[in-house]
Amino acid sequence: MSPHETHRTIDAIWRIESAKLIAVLTRMVRDVALAEDLAQDALVIALERWPDIGIPDNPGAWLMTAAKRRAIDFIRRNKLRDQKYDEIGRTAPLYKEDDVDQLLDGEISDDLLRLIFMTCHPVLSQDARVALTLRLLCGLTTDEIAHSFLVAESTVAQRIVRAKRTLSVEKVPFEVPIGEELNQRMAAVLEVIYLMFNEGYSATTGEQWIRPILCQEALRLGRILAEIAPCEPEVHGLVALMEIQASRLKARINAKGEPILLMNQNRAKWDHLLIRRGLAALERSRKLGRPLGPYSLQAAISACHAEARSVAETNWIRIAALYEALARLTPSLIIELNRAVAISMAFGPALGLQIVDELNKEPSLQEYHLLPSVRADLLAKLRRYDEARSEFERAASITRNTRERELLLQQAADCGSGTYKFQDLCPGLARF
Amino acid sequence: MRFMIIVKATTDSEAGVMPSQELLDAMQKYNEELLKAGVLLAADGLMPSSNAIRISYPEPGDKPILVDGPFTESKELIAGYTLIEVKSREEALEWALRMPDPHGNGQGELELRQVFEVEELMDNPDTLAKESDLRKQIEEQKKA
């Protein structure tokens, strides 16, 4: 193996092992920044030695041992003379040398769960939670994170340093919360993962609609969480939602990079393996026997589309009912808008338009481009083409996505020339 | 990126001999590891070729010829597969290397194959160039 190949192999091993290393080390030293440094030290040792001695048979265990040795050295030194960490030494039960090698798989899972609760802690800003989670749990480099969010590397680096400092200053404990706090904190974790997925799925600004790396990382993290927190129905709900949405990734854009809406997608291009996985995850959520939460409901809506062979064969009545249940759990004007579309598909555009016209009075929705775009489509279906055209134009003037603007202007032009095809379900609904 | 780790058949797997408990345990542990790493998409074991049917087209345009199993050349047959989703070829290889020797009788053989996927956006040179332009713009705006 050439040194270059060895390095690439070490990168791959790092990706598999880094989160576990950092999680276990955080438990030992109770400081996530220090834990990451120690894990990095182990990586440096591997980079120095492995090109000479070859990749060990069990590289994960090798790294873990090297990292733990560093941690034990640190703890010893720290006990002797470092006053700074003295408090940690007194208040937190630190590992003794004998128990470090006794860790079982289950305990590593527990440590990973504690780590994700830490990186998604509400004390951090949303941006910081996402960056820190990508870094510590997904093993992405600062550069990769910067690349996927189209921001400067220094910005991400700063964000991560500050986040780690905040966790330390605020003395955020390395633990799985219990009772009512567990629900709230779990919701925060799921929010971070879904935010990551969404950022990848449809970029809010710029030219590009899909940044696959973030979708993949979010999915992977969701799948991990489903194994380490199997009794949380909403974890499975979120995984189901992401699997089903990801199943459409390749059907969502044409060769020119333009978006194709759900109605027009070639369903044969959907990834049926991911759909099956999504349906299975939804079933896991249902089987836990608790009322469906917001992610499970959204996944159930998504599943209605995934299971339908065509738009016409879609169970719109069920979708409308699921939106109603969702609106009851998390009242929102946007869900109401989606319900309006489902109602229009189930019972005709006139009924849908009634709801949309009510929403149109909401001041908070004036800058929301999907509202005029849905309204335009319903007006066109009712053959009120002039009104439809001006609504499409209004939608185009509001959206920040270049590709979407082009599509909306095209639809406005089609209304003007009488060639508008009722292709457009509405991008918002297409999400579930 | 998706990869398929193909487990080749052996005389044992073709004869329907069940793997040892030890091997079953090791495989289960391995699958759990894949699950917990969030990389496992699907995995299955196949029945021996004794109940397989081979469909071949010796004369293009003519009807196919059907041949019932079992088939003899076990090295050419597969006994199972594991489908994983990873970030790089190296990561796929690393996971493949962690799979236990599937037969433990000297005949064990795996084959790692990449799944052909529709061109990814990120691999498209045009998109990459556009994105890099956009990044430059953002950097410059920051400086300004």
Image: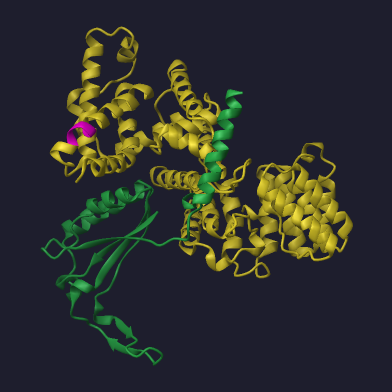
Chain colours: A yellow, B green
The residue closer to the viewer here, B70 or A343, is: B70
Who is closer to the viewer here, A166 or A343? Answer: A166
Is residue A289 something that shows in the picture? no
- Image location of residue A252, percent across then percent down: 59, 57
Residue shown at 24% from the left, 17% from the top: A75
All told, the count of numbered labels is 0
* Vertical side of A369 occupied by A376: above or below: below
Between B130 and B4, the one lying in front of the other is: B130
Residue A47: within the magenta? yes
Residue numbers of the magenta segment: A46-50
Residue at the spot 49% in from the left edge and 62% down from the top edge: A271
The percent position of residue A196, horizontal first and vertical second, equals: 52, 40
**Relative to A262, is A189 on the left or the right?**
left
Which residue is found at the position 29% from the left and 29% from the top? A39
Q: Nearer the viewer, residue B115 or A286?
A: B115
Res A407 → quadrant: bottom right
Q: Is residue A340 magenta?
A: no
Q: Position of residue A385 (x, y in %)?
A: 86, 60
- Picture coordinates of residue B16 (x, y %)? 20, 74
Instruction: Write down the quadrant of residue A80 in the picture.
Output: top left
Which residue is painted at 42% across and 23% down in the image?
Answer: A173
* Residue at the extreme left of the image, as rendered: B106
Residue A229, above or below B141: below
For the question of whether residue A396 can be seen, the reply is: yes
Magenta region, main secondary structure: helix
